[in-house]
Image (tube, helix red, strand yellow):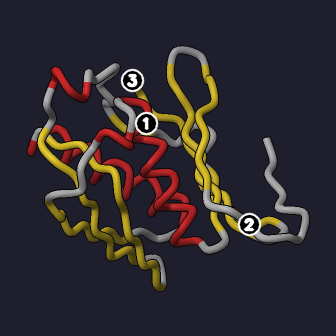
Amino acid sequence: MSWDCGGGDCRASWQHFQHDADVGLMGHGATLDEAFEQTALALTALITDPAGVRPLVERPIHCEAPDMELLLVDWLNALIYEMATKNMLFSRFRCHITDHCLAASAWGEEVDVMRHAPAVEVKGATYTCLAVRQEAGGWVASCVVDV
């Protein structure tokens, strides 16, 4: 699957793609930081509508990995860990990536089962379909998550 801005203005976006019994996440952005942010938003969208998650609490997240693909997996798994251990959902993300190090913030709130109606439990990010690449006019970050 490829994505191309056609040399024009790239807009940040995310999408899901099917992969056997699991689900793929893909984030697009004009910058690498933005692509990681959009992939995180796709993660939330698997669980609930991100528009219904209020950005009330900020959680700092730091990751380091030997390459960008492993950094993406670490980033998503750090978010999954925060969601599971702090009973949180996130709707806003800010990433800053330098030299295979990610310094980020995720904003969200505690899960309200009645209001958020969580659809699935994400167990973890995998190495399946793992890619972080620059394409014409922007960046793409993708991987499959175990649900």
Locate the N terminus by quadrant.
top right
Q: Which of these two is toward me, 112 or 68?
A: 112
Q: Amino acid at mark 2?
A: Cys
Q: Position of residue 25 (x, y in %)?
A: 55, 40
Q: Residue furthest bottom?
A: 98
Q: Is residue 16 above or below residue 76?
A: above
**Residue 17 rendering spot, x and y as whole percentages:** 63, 30
Identify the residue shown where x is 18% and y is 63%: 59
- Closer to viewer: mark 3 or mark 1: 1
Choose top left, top right, bottom left or bottom right for residue 135. Answer: bottom right
Q: Give the crowd class for mark 1: few <14, some 14-19, many >=20 residues within 10 Å.
A: many
Which residue lies under the disc numbered 1?
45
Q: Going from the N terminus, do you reach mark 3 or mark 1 first?
A: 1
Residue at 45%, 63% in the rendered image: 71
Residue reaching furthest to the right: 6
Lower position in the chain sequence, tag 2 or tag 3: 2
Q: Tell which of 54 and 119 is nearer to you.
A: 54
Q: Nearer the viewer, mark 2 or mark 3?
A: 2
Mark 1–mark 2 distance (CA, rounded to whole Å) = 21 Å
On the image, the x and y values in percent for residue 132 come to 63, 60
Residue matched to label 2: 10
Kindly identify which numbered label has been placed on residue 113.
none
Indicate the position of residue 95 as horizontal and vertical percent values.
41, 72
Image quarter where the C terminus lies is top left
For mark 1, give the secondary structure: helix
Query: What crowding class fits label 3: few (fewer than 14 Cα within 10 Å), some (14-19), or many (20 or more)?
Result: some
Q: Which amino acid type is shown beneath numbered disc 3?
A: Val
Spatial separation of the CA atoms under disc 3 and disc 1: 13 Å
Task: Give the labeled residue for mark 3.
Answer: 147
